[in-house]
Image: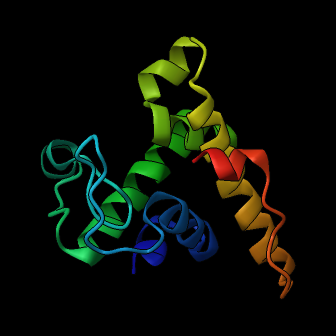
Amino acid sequence: MASRETGIPPMLLAAVVFVESRGQARAISSAGAIGPMQLMPTTAMRVLHVNPWQIQQNILGGAVFLQDLLKRFHGNLTLALDAYNAGPTRVASGEPLPPSAVAYAKTVEALLQWAKAGTQAAPLQSRATTQL
């Protein structure tokens, strides 16, 4: 549903869900982000107009946000993922990103490439993955 409505490839959404929450529907971060796409409740309700506690709405909200970021950063997936993690204002300003945001984007992209390759072998665990 979210992929169809936003045009975000299902494998990309799956990679983001895995890195964000390991697929846990009721995940809550120390910062207060919730659900499989780890949406901040205020952003989810006021900006994305979704109930972040409803799994399908959470994923749709995250997909809409990612779609907006891809448009904002002219299709640059790395910048969109950096912004999903560290915030679009920070990325647009060009200020240095925290290492965790850089690792996040690299991990999502690695999972996406692994899924696209269709390999049965697990992706190599990089330092970026172990820092998340």
Left of 37 or right of it: where is 124? right
The one of 103 and 14 positioned closer to us in this rendering: 103
Image quadrant occupied by the N terminus: bottom left
Residue at left 17%, top 68%?
53
Q: Is residue 79 above or below residue 131?
A: above
Rendering colour mode: rainbow
Q: Using the rendered view, name the quadrant where residue 95 is placed.
A: top right
Q: Position of residue 31 (x, y in %)?
A: 27, 40
Q: Using the rendered view, name the quadrant where residue 101 is placed.
A: top right
Is any part of residue 76 visible from this angle? Answer: no
Is any part of residue 108 visible from this angle? Answer: yes
Residue at left 37%, top 74%?
24
Residue at left 24%, top 46%?
40
Left of 97 or right of it: where is 127? right
Q: Position of residue 103 (x, y in %)?
A: 66, 41
Left of 87 or right of it: where is 25? left
The one of 31 and 14 positioned closer to us in this rendering: 31
Q: Is residue 47 above or below residue 54?
A: above
Q: Position of residue 64 (x, y in %)?
A: 38, 56
